Image (tube, rainbow, N blue to C red):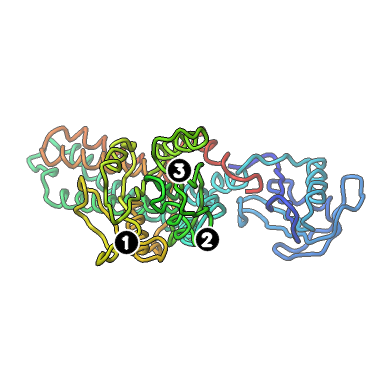
Amino acid sequence: MKATDTIAAIATAPGRGAVGIVRLSGPAAFAIAGQLAGPQPEPRVAALRTFRDETGAPLDEGLLLLFPGPHSYTGEDVAELQGHGGPRVLDLVLRAALALGARAARPGEFSERAFLNGRLDLAQAEAIADLINAATVQAARAAQRSLSGEFSREVTARVEELTQLRTYVEGALDFSDEDVNWLADEKLRTRIDVLVAHLQSLLGAASQGRRLREGMTVALAGQPNVGKSTLLNALAGTEAAIVTEIAGTTRDVLRENIDLDGLPLTLVDTAGLRDSKDPVEKIGIARAWQALEAAELVLFLVEDRTGVTAQDQALLKKLPAGGEVLIVRNKCDLTVGAPHGRDDDGRDGRVELRLCAKSGAGLDLLKAEIRRVAGLTDAGESLFSARTRHVDALVRGLALVREAALRLREGANAELAAEELRLAQQALGEITGAVSSDDLLGRIFSQFCIGK
């Protein structure tokens, strides 16, 4: 795609900084940059220039760099004016570029042009936004691996396997009137089984990558004074919540974003669940139940000395059905002869962990259990970032391949099997943008920042 207009935007984050960048991309990028900053330097060579507006009045002094297409970020001619990072100065330079014929870029339009010009596929373009928004080091590394094309290469390899299968199946259908039943060949079944295994592995990795990107919400619940705020502080590594011996100290929902061994986690501390006549505490308890509705994992705290009481059991039955529940038997230091540990045969088959939030004993077991619930079985060094739409496409593709395999194994409806393989290939093509719609592209790139 060749754009007929030239776009411009501030490419650095809002606020004041030592350096700020105004970026232009399009057929007139170099001409406009020349009018703003004078003589054009050699490509990819920074030159000191005075930036001037359309009337010739000086605006700033900085560096001018030119990146000729197609070997640029967008695949078009790209110019960057790197000046001082004051918001007002950058705005003046941008206004001058617009006055000289550029158009203000839409959110994500630079990356959109890079995709449309073949510089990036869709998964790589999304990885740029994921890298910018990464909440943990592991999430940033995963996004970088996707940006480098690791995820796309895996998807492309699976598409190639599907292409070969489709070629074989559709070729066999063309010669179905011959004596040889090509679709009964054991090699065909083996190839389909291998493809299913590859898709399952890719789906597992993508699901973990999505979790690294999106994180997980964990709510702490239980009766008053069982140590919820102490546990939040222990996991967060800071005194985020007020801790006292007075029951009912926490009266509102407290949220803390933490990095749990590479997993972005939103910890939600809630008011103790009990009947209360205090109007303020009643509001806090109502908000606690709302927070539990939204949580993907509930850590239900009880005192280790008493275990799960009848009151606790009544509260457990009222918990929302959507999320997973882990019973945490806190204050194990007060129970004689009860070291921290894990019990897989807890009440109602739930996992129970015994720990001491105050001393930190058993905290590593809890962290490992949270990662298990999140589905993070990999150490993170080989994961790539992924999104919900990627996972959905893989789920659809895998289901279609399985259905086609079943039809071929039964020796019936081979034409439908061929169509299911085609649809599976189309589903995987949505990930990299080989198959996409304008509406999908619009939704994806609108989530980017302006300068990207």
Residue 271: assigned label = 3
| Local crowd size for mark 1, using a 10 Å CA cut-off: few (<14), some (14–19), many (≥20) | many
Q: Amino acid at mark 1?
A: Cys
Question: To which residue does mark 2 refer?
Answer: 238
Q: Nearer the viewer, mark 2 or mark 1?
A: 1
Residue at image point 52% right, 40% down: 444
Write the residue at 55% across / 36% down.
442
Instruction: Give me the C-alpha separation between circle 2 and circle 1.
Output: 22 Å
Q: CA distance from mark 3 to mark 2?
A: 19 Å
Residue 368 as seen in the image, left or right of residue 128: left
Does residue 61 show up? yes
Q: CA distance from mark 1 to mark 3?
A: 22 Å
Q: Secondary structure at mark 1?
A: helix
Which residue sits at x=36%, y=41%? 393
Q: Which mark is residue 263?
A: none
Contact? badges 3 and 2 (CB < 8 Å): no
SS assignment at label 3: loop
* Tag 2: amino acid: Thr
